Amino acid sequence: MLTRSFIALSFLYPSLALLSACSSVTQIDTNPVITQQLQTTAVDLFFTHDNLHTRDTFNQAVKLIQNENNPEQLDRQLYFLRAFSYFGPIETLTLDDKRRLTSALITLSKRQLFIENPRLQEHFAVTLYLYYNTDDTALLLSKLLPILNTQLTRLAQLPITETNDYALWETLRAYGLLLTAARKDNENALAKQLINANISQALLAFASSPQSLHAQQDWPRANAYWALGQYRLVLPSEDDGSSSAAELAIDTAVAKMAKADVEQRGIMAKNTYTLGFHVNTFSGKESCEQQSDICHIPALTEILPIHHVCSKSLFILAQDLNQQELAQSCDKLISQASNFHQLLQTAETPTANDTNSALRVVTFKNWSQYNAYGQLLFDIQTDNGGMYIEGIPSKPNNQATFFAYRQFWIAPEFAIWNLNHEYVHYLDGHFVKYGGFGHFPSKMVWWSEGLAEYVSKGNDNPSTLEVIKREIEKAPTLEEIFATEYKDGQDRTYKWSYMAVRFLAENYHSDLVQLSKYLKTDYFEGYELLLEQLSKHQQQFALWVNEQATIFEEETEKNTTKINKLNRYGYRDYLTPNHLTQDSKHLHF
């Protein structure tokens, strides 16, 4: 892909009218058997797939929170809610269930034992970002955000202890993760409720206070900056795309704090601002250079110290890859190039006027690092899952580059996200398509993305076949696939385009090769005419697609339930305080 967005497609939520449909919530009866289970089951067992995670158990836990006065039991039930969000059937919870939860949290927040217990406040913050991150809970969340604001102020005044730090950290994360969910669509109810709740004032007050620095540790201020950055992204811009007065006000307020901080702490304060706020508002390299009094750009070799040559046409700049990982990556790419040249019969001859001599693969250790240093070092937009930039092929010394990162979520296994897919874009641009990106006027998305998917995955593509089997009744035609644009969605862009390329490779290979030759010789009219002729194979394509769907067997583990994990791109690794580990009392997935 030329630019892949990691942001999920927006979902439609139930009407907010449902929230006010009734003013009271039906109470549930106590179930002594479930209550005893919740009160006596080993806490470690909460974080497993078992029969304890049911909607009834969720509601019994909420009822206990509503009425319990024992801090240890409240700790248990709130921790069970955290576990349920990961291992339970969270999609079965109704709006009434969440109303009951809201009532229980409000009741809890008024008790002295809550006010005096940071562990319970930690749970409160976590519950907010796990259960109130969608439109249908927006009005319910509005009742809880004032409690969160008060909690932030209270926690800031407490002595520095590990327990207090966990509570403060999760409170700051609650702001940021809720805002991250809301910024998918800043016209939705969740975004509006967060904007209207004065959370920016609470965050600004905290970030500018001495309490946001813990001796030599500035993680509280960095996390507050990050949350303010997410708030800034939620704010609507002007109709012409320019920054609104509200957006500029946040920029000004944070910059003012950062300047005062730099006067006190120097380069440390610059790094806090840069990695906390600047890169998380996707402000980029040029803006950082213009604000050099508060923003810092490190040397390239400081971030990417590894330079590894795979071949005369391929080299890697890496942040943390070891020799085995470098060799594995090179081998995968070199073998794939051979398959590409064989498929399209390129004779390994570059297109005319293409001066690229070697692909540069820039690999960061995770998305957080890519987001930060992709902007600061290479001036690229990083609100995506990695990208290939061809540059201007005819420009002397042009450097085509693929920006990527580890698939950190599969550790300890190793892979570079989209490595093979993106390498096909380079091969396609260097050996097939004349000119740079955007040279041809249309009908390139299916070719670029379908070819990259097919060459990188071959016939082993179960995730695509799952979608094809599910959407077989509304399958696009060949003509529609050939006209695909990126706005048509990921399934059309990647999965159906893959099917079209695979169909041609298996049934009309010579025509597929001819299409590549037309692109190589810059003969777009011939390319379009051949696509028109290939569209006439629609009936055969439809039968072929049905055949693939019929023989495909979903490769799923039938007895394994997936964990409802947090958005892997929602947080930043460098914001995590080093001393706050995910031990048995602080688990997340």
Image (cartoon, grey):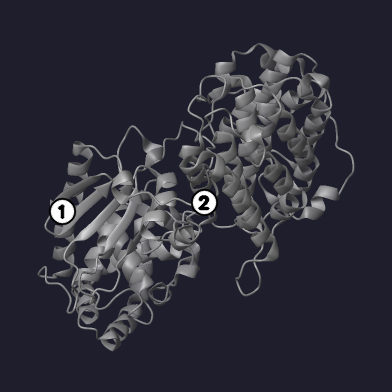
Is residue 258 something one can see in this rendering? yes
First reached walking from the N terminus: tag 1 or tag 2: 2
Mark 1 and mark 2: span between their CA atoms?
43 Å
The disc label shown at residue 318, or none: none
The residue that label 2 is drawn on is 294
Query: Is the residue 165 above or below the residue 181 in the image?
Result: above
Which is more toward the observer, 251 or 134? 251
Is residue 457 something one can see in this rendering? no
Q: Does residue 333 appear left or right of residue 156 in this picture?
A: left
Kindly identify the amino acid type of the residue bearing the numbered disc 2: Ile
- Where residue 401 sits: x, y (%)? 28, 60
Kindly identify the amino acid type of the residue bearing the numbered disc 1: Ile
Determine crowd level at label 2: few under 14, some 14-19, many 20+ residues with C-alpha closer than 10 A: many
Q: Residue furthest top?
A: 40
How many marks the image carries: the answer is 2
Screen quadrant of the N terminus: bottom left
- Where residue 242 sits: x, y (%)? 61, 70
- Where residue 234 sits: x, y (%)? 64, 56
The residue that label 1 is drawn on is 334
- Determine whether the residue tagged by mark 2 lies in a helix, strand or loop: loop
Determine crowd level at label 1: few under 14, some 14-19, many 20+ residues with C-alpha closer than 10 A: some
Which is more toward the observer, 289 or 165? 289
Residue that appears at 59% across and 16% down = 43
- Determine whether the residue tagged by mark 1 lies in a helix, strand or loop: helix
